[in-house]
Image (cartoon, rainbow, N blue to C red):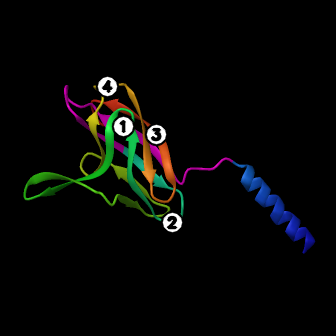
Amino acid sequence: MRLFLIAVASLACFAAAQPALAAVVVTDAWIRTPPPGAQTAAGYAVLANRSIATDRLTGGHTSAAASVEVHQTSMGGGMMKMKAMPQGLAIAGSSTVRLHPEGYHLMLTGLRRPLKAGQKVRITLSFQRSGDTAADFTVRDTAP
C-alpha cells in the first residue's frame, strides 16, 4: 500500500510539472481577404476538441477588429443567409468541427485596419470550458 501511495504521489507531481495542453486545438486558420474599405471579414479554421467533454466556442477577440463573433451561413429559399450564434458553437468531446465559408465561421466586425493577403492576424478564441486559445490566422485571397 505504501508503494502504491508513493507511485500515486510521484505521478501527481509529474503531471503538475507538465505544461498544460489546450483542450481545443486550432489548425488551418485563415481569413478571406476582405474587399478594400470593408468593415468585416470572415475567419475559418479546424477546431479539434481533445477533451472528452463538450466545449463551446463563444467568440473571441483580436486587435484587428472591434469584435469576433460566431456566425452560421445557411441556404434558405434559394438565398444564402447568415446569422449570429450568440450561444456559440458546441464542439462535442473527442470531435472536430470545421469552420468554412458555407457553414460556421468567425465574423470579424469593425476592422481597425485593412487586411492584406499574406498577413497574419492573431485571434484569441474563447471557449466555455477550456478558456482562451490564441491562433494565427493567415489572410488569403482563396481557401487553402
Which numbered tag is attached to residue 117? 4
Q: Given the image, on which type of amino acid does mark 2 rest?
A: Ala
The residue where tag 3 is placed is 135
Spot occupied by residue 31 in the image (x, y as percentages of width and height): 32, 36
Residue at 38% across, 61% down: 90
User: Which is more toward the observer, 77 or 134?
Assistant: 134
Name which residue type carries label 3: Ala
Q: Residue 48 at what x, y percent from top left?
A: 47, 53
- Count the numbered circles shown: 4
* Magenta part of the chain: 19-44
Q: Is residue 78 magenta?
A: no
Q: Residues within 10 Å of mark 3 (few under 14, many from 20)?
A: some
* Image x and y of residue 21, in percent: 60, 50
Tag in front: 3 or 1 = 3
10 Å neighbourhood of mark 4: few (<14), some, or many (≥20)? some
Residue drawn at (31%, 38%), measured in percent from left and top? 66
Looking at the image, which residue is at 45% across and 58% down?
A: 128
Do the numbered discs 1 and 4 sit on residues whose CB atoms are within 8 Å? no
- Kind of residue at badge 1: Trp
Q: Quickly name the residue at label 1.
A: 30
The kind of secondary structure element at disc 1 is strand
Please identify the quarter of the rendering in which residue 68 is found: top left
